[in-house]
Image (tube, rainbow, N blue to C red):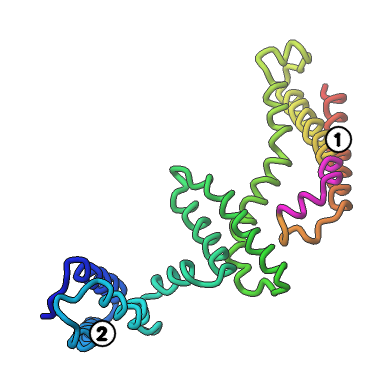
Amino acid sequence: MIEMTPAARERLDNYLQRMRSELRGTRAVVADEVEQSVREHIEIALAQAQAPVGATEVIGILDRLGPPERWLGDEERPMWRRALDHVRSGPEDGRLAYLSFGLFVASIVLLPIFGFLLLIPAMFVGRAWVELARDRGEPLGARRWLVYPAMAVVLAFATGLLIIGPPMMAIAFALGPDVESLLDIPTSRLGELRFLAGLGGVMFGSWWIIAGGFCAAFIRPIRFVFSPLLDGLRRKHFAVLAAIGALVAAAGATLIYYRH
């Protein structure tokens, strides 16, 4: 046993601990062989050193050996460790893509608690990766499927909120406790249903007209935030939404007018 100073022993122990952690989950034979090989290499390198060996000499040996991860080939490492190392030490664009997907998975796992709060950072990390790839002139490639899920979920939620959120709140406000006396709703069940359907049509249709015009005016920021999913978005799509809104509002007004 080579005599070392406490600082040198601590450095060596930390290195071996990291190596054992890296070897955890591999086959026992491979792990034992690698650890034994590393120990022998260190003892040979320090055999001629003057005792007690100081931390500086140990650090020099460990630097020449390289990080503990290098002692195990990729084919022997668990898949989850390879993925983690790729996120931790891979190229910046790769880290961003994997981080976005990791946040998305975490949002699903933690959904009952606060998972939905992770969707926004997952989306913006994904957008950062998209912009980085475009600045470099690189194709998005297969990694786009790591960032699309979070962006698609946020886009779907924002679209649903835009389409049904404001009119639903307006209907809830209109259908207060005094709605029958204020609007003279007929007592027949059929008349009530026709009125409610007409009210919904007017509320939804009117809002879709407003939303179509608003989104058409701000189409560039919308495309930028949700790029590349909405790169093909055009003002004509919002014109279609406004046209549908006009038809729905007209149908709703007709039902209210002829509710008796």
* Residue 220, percent from left and from top: 81, 51
Q: Is residue 91 magenta?
A: no
The residue wearing badge 1 is 251
Q: Give me the residue at 72% from left, 16% from top.
A: 179
Judged left or right of residue 204, residue 93 is left
Q: Give me the residue at 21% from left, 83% from top.
A: 39
- Quick check: can you spot residue 24? no
Name the residue nearer the viewer: 160 or 205.
160
SS for dot 2: helix
Q: Amino acid at mark 2?
A: Val
Q: Give me the residue at 24% from left, 74% from top.
A: 16
Q: Give me the residue at 75% from left, 58% from top.
A: 230
Screen quadrant of the C terminus: top right
Screen quadrant of the N terminus: bottom left
Marker disc for residue 34: 2
* Residue 197, percent from left and from top: 76, 31
* Residue 154, percent from left and from top: 63, 50
Judged left or right of residue 41, residue 135 is right
Q: CA distance from mark 2 to mark 1?
A: 76 Å
Name the residue nearer the viewer: 150 or 65.
65
Residue range corresponding to the magenta coloring: 212-225
